[in-house]
Image: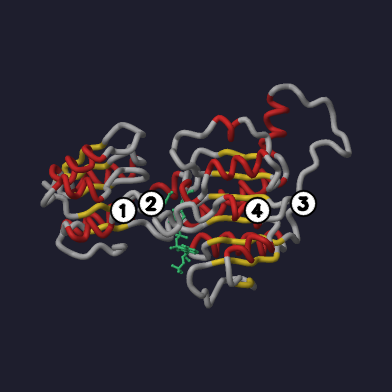
Amino acid sequence: MKKILITRILPDKVLDAARAKFDVTVRDDVTPLNVNEAADALQTYDGILPTLGDAFDATCFEQAGKPRCKILANFGVGYNHIDATAAAKAGVFVSNTPGAVTDATADIAMTLLLMTARRASEGERITRAGGWKGWGPVQMLGTHVTGKTVAIIGMGRIGKAIAKRCHYGFDMNVVFYNRSIVQEPGVPAEQMPTLEAALGAADFVVVAVPGSKETHHLIDGNAFRDMKSTGIFINISRGDVVDEPALISALQNKVIHAAGLDVYEQEPFVPEALRALDNVTLLPHLGTAALEVRENMGMMALDNLIAALDGKAPPNKV
Ligand SMILES: NC(=O)C1=CN([C@@H]2O[C@H](COP(=O)(O)OP(=O)(O)OC[C@H]3O[C@@H](n4cnc5c(N)ncnc54)[C@H](OP(=O)(O)O)[C@@H]3O)[C@@H](O)[C@H]2O)C=CC1
Ligand SMILES: O=CC(=O)O
């Protein structure tokens, strides 16, 4: 039986399906594999089902030499923790789970957008603490969402699903910035020629690009200065797409109005300065956290792994 490593506990449905085919080791830990552990896994297992943050970087492939492993079947669409070029050189397939994550992640973007605009987490904290003294017409006034302009940065699968929700659900005007021309944004939407133009046009900015060398700190201090001072910033992509200290400074100095975040530069570390701010909504990377979604992601990753260990190209090879 082929030996595989699953680097986090997955839903039972996925683990049962994996155990029916393979000799499975499941790592019972929520911290990512470090470089040494990742290199060791490449030498020990025929296939690996890694996820967020597991350090399959260039150093790990150098360390592993000629690996036993044939595939890194990533659990998730974002694979910025894997050096796909180094993997290809080492003869290791890399696959991901596109599509399985799209709607759930778009829903979390909308959750953040609404919660932040309407000060929902702040209100919840007050209510839970017994601090609500009664309804008042000028109490806890937030930002109205319907009819406003949203700028989507990265108009791929998730960006388009967010655009659909904004346009059809909230009558919002959609503009976007994307690396290449998008022929079919899925809703009436204007592609902006520059990031600056998109940021400047919007009441809400939602970031949905992949993490990569190219997108590292794409959103920096200048980007926040390009936004309206009433603007609300949402990030569901990867933490390091945003310069976090610049975001904190922009919030503290009222360069922008508020922010809603699902991802952070050094997860699970969330800076105290961010946690101290009332005008931010902070979620613990909940984008795909729904059982059916995690099952679908797992089964998709497993299909990729099975294909590669049968000597075929995985269906979702990146
Ligand atoms: N919070 C969470 O739990 C989740 C987060 N994610 C994150 O969301 C990301 C996006 O996923 P998905 O929509 O499926 O990916 P896609 O590949 O479908 O979309 C990414 C889009 O970003 C664009 N893009 C890439 N680089 C740049 C750039 N430098 N400037 C502007 N646009 C750029 C791409 O443009 P082009 O057309 O040129 O390629 C593409 O349209 C994932 O990579 C992952 O990091 C995903 C799932 C859950
Ligand atoms: O962050 C999750 C992913 O699928 O990427």
Residue 83: x percent and y percent? 28, 54
Q: Residue beneath label 1, please?
A: 301
- The disc placed on residue 128 is none
In terms of image quadrants, where is residue 118? top right
Which residue in the rendered view is the most extreme toward the bottom?
Answer: 183
Kind of residue at disc 2: Gly
State the separation of the CA atoms marked 3 and 4.
Answer: 22 Å
Q: Is residue 84 left or right of residue 115?
A: left
In terms of image quadrants, where is residue 43? top left
Q: Nearer the viewer, mark 3 or mark 4?
A: 4
Q: Residue beneath label 2, please?
A: 76
- Tell which of 195 and 79 is nearer to you: 195
Q: Residue beneath label 3, please?
A: 144
- Tell which of 246 and 39 is nearer to you: 246
Residue 132: x percent and y percent? 78, 26
State the separation of the CA atoms marked 3 and 2.
Answer: 33 Å
**Mark 2 residue CB less than 8 A from any atom of ligand 2:** yes
Residue 224: x percent and y percent? 62, 52
Query: Where does the C terminus fall, quadrant-wise?
Result: bottom left
- The disc placed on residue 225 is 4
Tag 1 secondary structure:
helix
Q: Earlier in the sequence, mark 3 or mark 4?
A: 3
Q: Earlier in the sequence, mark 4 or mark 2?
A: 2
Which residue in the rendered view is the most extreme toward the front?
Answer: 222
Q: Earlier in the sequence, mark 2 or mark 1?
A: 2
State the separation of the CA atoms marked 4 and 2.
Answer: 32 Å
Kind of residue at disc 1: Ala
